[in-house]
Image (cartoon, rainbow, N blue to C red):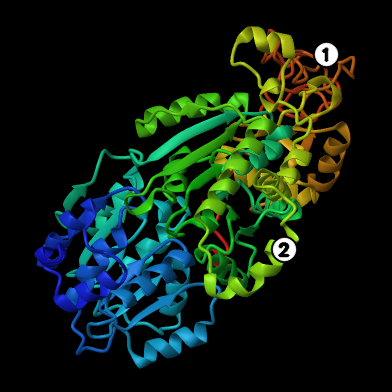
Amino acid sequence: MNAFEQLGITPDLIKGIEKLGFTTPTAIQEQAIPVLIENKRDFVGLAQTGTGKTAAFGLPLLELIDYTKNYPQALILSPTRELCVQISQDLKEYSFYAQQAKVLAVYGGANIVTQISALKRGVHIVAATPGRLLDLIDRRAIDLSKITHVVLDEADEMLNMGFQEDINSILGNTPEEKRTWLFSATMPSQVRAIASKYMNDPFELTIGKKNSANENISHEFYMIRDREKYSALKRIVDFSPEIFGLIFCRTKVETQEIAEKLMKDGYNADSLHGDLSQQQRDKVMARFKSKTLQMLVATDVAARGIDVDNVTHVINYHLPDEIENYTHRSGRTARAGKTGVSISLIGNRDFSKIKHLERLINTKFVKKTIPSGAEVCEKQLYALIAKVHDVEVNEKEIGKYLPHVNESLKDLSREELIKKFTSMEFNRFLEYYKNAPDLNSTQRDDSSSDRNNRGDRGERGERTERADGNRLFINLGIKDDVDKASFIEFISGLANIKSSVIGHVQMNDTFSHFDVATPADATLIIDMVNGAKHNGRKLRVDLAERKRESSGGGGGYNRGGGDRRGGGFNRGPRRDDRRGGGGNSYGGNSSNGGGGNSYGGGDKPFRSKRPRFNKSDR
């Protein structure tokens, strides 16, 4: 007897999941399916990414649908189009031998007219992204009044992406008497609020510890200066010949840059980000799922919902700005009980984030050293030999060629033949890694003595020349609902520069400081960004520190140094003394040193709604 039968799954559905290789339920499936099939209570299920949540809610839905009624009875909300499509495909495969469930995926980037036509023909289950579903509701193309079940999949991800208002609006269009099932990897306060507002005495199930990591994932980190990060990435990849992995970057620009570099250097890689069309995204994902693509470089938003088996490595080119997202990234490997490795490439300033992650997910991170060129060559050689040893010989097809091959190689001994054969591939790595530098030698130790010896270096590995015009101020901060990743993407986009030009970013409530590579970059950013607008507010960018330039005594940011515009943020004594002390203003209006009391030359701190993603990312 199949173990799923004991959970209440009917034989026809069992036949469908057996075709997919499912014979033993995962922990979340084993405990959730019987409860959901009973259909008596709302449900909250907490389990890590990759633990089989889709089948945990998908199989009960297929059991509870009334196939004689040709209208939407179940609604599944997911954060991204990839996950939306994946869910609909899974449900169709589960029901392959049962009554064919009519499952429709509706998401942005696809033809909405086609989706409306499918809805008119009748469906049982709708898997949707919030943005596209709201479009259909606004067009009165979908009727949710007869929905009996709503599933919020990856609920924490949807809220992280800014879909709080959309979810509220959608749930407001559904009947009160429905059953609501919420599945999530973590349980932040926003998710708890949704459960409290829209669910009635839900049954709560937690698999493992809340916010804990998958025990089958090894967590490693490498300390590396940013200027050598790409070289370290290639070396780590070369040290893992059988890698099939995801590389996470912070911004769309950086994602494209890293993917293009890898492709140029001969690696089988491509990118996935929000600027790609739906056709391009589908093509990239098809290649990755079929393993014709070895490495996929992606942003957090684009990669959410990727469900691909046998991913061996997840590499964090940068740690996520939202530290909780680390579990979602790492959860792309070690799925369905397999093992995997999550690697983070970090600078010295990120070491505290690693310690915070260890506490957050209750897992020890192992510090690794970047392999030397000789170690990479050795690993590649042994991998090549293993491939040769295990290759399957097609005796029938190759037989007719062997006489000529044997004749051509008859003057070579066994030892010579082995040397020449292995050298064909091995020489390429020997040449590439000839005299390769030790990337570990440039790492900074996290000690004060090392910092004193090396000087103050920025997050991106360049020396932070604070007195030479490489540090900038901007009247844009945390209260404008921007994080470091979106900040870098916003500034680099306005200035039309590479994101790597921007170094350490220090964000405050209403303003920020950030380092750039050269004074020329600082001048370019000032010219291009000054006067631009963010949510309707005019931005101002200026040098954060400068030498004393006026005789009026106005306190500049440079610990009492004057600012040619007058009062800056005086770090010296008498901070609020307007007779020369500088006040609390960046760029006050007095040319004689008088300071104002506001940030940004009189601008009030600006609050905006959480930035919405483009429909292409919905």
Find numbered disc 2 in the image and state the secondary structure of the residue it sits on: helix
Q: Are marks 1 and 2 in contact (CB under 8 Å)?
A: no
Question: Residue 410 sits in which quadrant?
Answer: bottom right
Residue under the image location 53 percent in, 48 percent down: 386
Q: Residue at x 65, y 7 (%)?
A: 449
Q: Quadrant of the N terminus?
A: bottom left
Q: Inspect this view and state whether residue 505 appears.
A: no
Res. 553 mark: 1
Few, some or many C-alpha atoms within 10 Å of disc 1 (few <14, some 14-19, many ≥20)?
Answer: many
Which is more N-terminal, label 2 or label 1?
2
Is residue 611 something one can see in this rendering? yes
| x then y, percent, for residue 41 | 13, 61
Label placed on residue 407: 2
Image side of residue 125 versus residue 531, left or right: left
Real-space Cα distance between discs 1 and 2? 91 Å
State the SS at label 1. Answer: loop
Query: Where residue 62 appears, x then y in whole percent?
Result: 22, 75
Task: Pick whichever, 229 or 524, lies toward us.
Answer: 229
Residue 601, labelled with which disc?
A: none
Q: Is residue 348 left or right of residue 108?
A: right
Residue 400 vs 318, above or below: the answer is: below
Residue at image position (84%, 27%) is 469
Q: Relative to residue 223, is residue 421 drawn left or right? A: right
**Residue beneath the point at 62% across and 31% down:** 371
Q: Position of residue 463 (x, y in %)?
A: 77, 23
Q: Point out residue 189 in the picture as x, y percentages from the top left corner.
A: 33, 43
